[in-house]
Amino acid sequence: MFNFGEILETLKMIQEENLDIRTITLGVSLLDCVDGSLEKTCENIKRKIKAKGQHLVETAKKLEVKYGIPIVNARVSVTPISLLAGSFDEEGTLKIGYALEEVAEEIGVNFIGGFSALVHKGFTKGDLNVFKTIPRVLSETERVCASINVATTKAGINMDGINYAAKIIKETAELTREKDGLGCAKIVVFANAPEDNPFMAGAFHGIGEAEYVVNVGVSGPGVVKRVVEKMPQADLEELANEVKKTSFKITRVGELIGKEAAKLLDVKFGIVDLSLAPTPAMGDSVAEIIEAMGLEYCGAPGTTAALMMLTDAVKKGGAMASSMVGGLSGAFIPVSEDMGMVRAVEVGALNLEKLEAMTAVCSVGLDMIAIPGDTPETTIAGIIADEISIGVINGKTTAVRIIPVPGKKAGEYVEFGGLLGRTVIMEVSCFGSQKFVLRGGRIPAPIQSLRN
Amino acid sequence: MQEKALITVIGEDRVGIIARIATLLAQADVNILDISQTITGGLFTMIMMVDITNCKIEFEELKKLLKEVGQELKLNIEIQHENIFRAMHRL
């Protein structure tokens, strides 16, 4: 039997501190779906996703009831479409995008990720097809998410890819103008993209993965915040230790749900992603954890150190709890999805440059950042290049999800709704990057041995 | 294999809480394995370990019925499969 303390702790974590399973993501390989005919290919894709995917939502529901823990999202990730799109033209690639939307709607998932291209070293015909169609797919569908990997530590940085990505982001913003550029919330530009990430919009099913796989993303910033708040006198070592213990518990729940979901769907269990993923709900904020550690606002000097400690403690606790960890793992710092972050931007404690520094120690990067709609394409390319460089030289994943909101200026507000939240539009440096980024080509891979 | 769940009841103390819940469980063929309760500062807290192996209604239905009893008695009643506690608190 469990004691009162343990049981009440679990209940409290779920009911008051927003502990939940953020997502169960079913990964599906589409490599065997390509056929000479486009219609047949689309049919194959839909059939294959449906085969396991049609039970995904009910499985999540079942586990939610059984364990009394909310499972917020059920989603699907697929093989990067650029690997299939080479057999078709632009129009065909577009149709594949529509097919993904159709099947996602049919099985009731809110997002399907994998309208992706991997161009860290160069472009294939399939990559170009995906690039050309991303703005239309993101504006004409609701559920399809796109990602582009433009760099890896081993290949270096494809600046042409970054320039193209910046162009796509501007086009997507324009095509979804009436929704404040919402389409851009569904595209992520990566360095060192993980192949087993369950979190949207960057999820795709990597080519090293099994036919079908279930990955789970846990959340729980609220739980960690409570732990930190309860220890105002503790030194940083003690604090890190408590965060570690909490992360252990959270991860164990993730593993339990993930393994059981995989069993019910009769597919392989992949990984638990140990990320703390905030939501716009009060208290469910990574910024508030940092503030609870003793910083006046997230963004104040010391923030990077606090975030580093948090990310590392989360990983340490999680790595002990489950042998199958992966994805992005750490702490997400999206701006619009985290009320604490938004508040820090409002008071001027947090700007783009500080966020960039923080991404050297967090799990992803510049995430859900709204910028003025008239920001030049080359400036966006510069922002992406900076962020991607941090990932490449440090051998970690970094990413950019940025939204140039058409017709709006810095300081104005934008509302994306639901989990995507609302935020104030951030100031962007007015100094140009044009000549640098338009040189194009590839920034060579960094040397691994002379690290400093 | 025996399947167990934990029922937690939190709220203001009153006469008949255990009787009401036990009756419901008996009707559903759910066997009570262990009960422990405390009252601290007027707050009634009870934890019940039950065997749901032979439960003749769906788990979801059982949960709903318990919730209804909770509403009636102004208590917060939850039922969760034992595994979540095992995962979180036992190595």
Image (tube, rainbow, N blue to C red):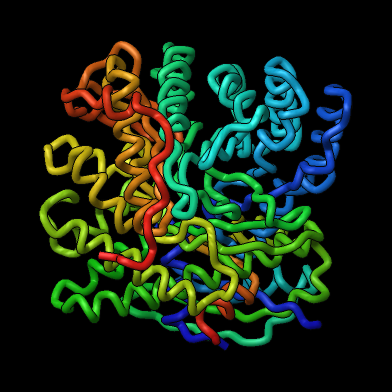
* Residue in the foreground of this view, choosing between B5 and A228: A228
The residue drawn where x is 81% and y is 82% is: B1
In the image, A344: left or right of A397? left
Residue A22, how many percent across, how many down? 52, 52
In the image, A53: left or right of B47? right
Residue A238, how many percent across, how many down? 24, 81
Residue A210, above or below A108 = below
Tell me the quarter of the image containing the N terminus of chain A. Answer: bottom right
Does residue B85 appear in this view?
Answer: yes
Residue A427, above or below A326 = above
Disc tally is 0
Quadrant in which residue A235 is drawn: bottom left
Tell me the quarter of the image containing the C terminus of chain A. Answer: bottom left
Residue A203, above or below A250 = above
* Residue in the foreground of this view, choosing between A305 and A68: A305
Quadrant in which residue B55 is drawn: bottom right
The residue drawn where x is 50% and y is 81% is: B89
Residue A219, above or below A402 = below
* Residue in the foreground of this view, choosing between B45 and A350: A350
The residue drawn where x is 74% and y is 34% is: A84
Does residue A61 appear in this view?
Answer: no
In the image, A327: left or right of A98? left
In the image, A325: left or right of B28? left
Residue A281, how many percent across, how many down? 37, 45
The residue drawn where x is 75% and y is 32% is: A103
Residue A45, how many percent across, how many down? 80, 35
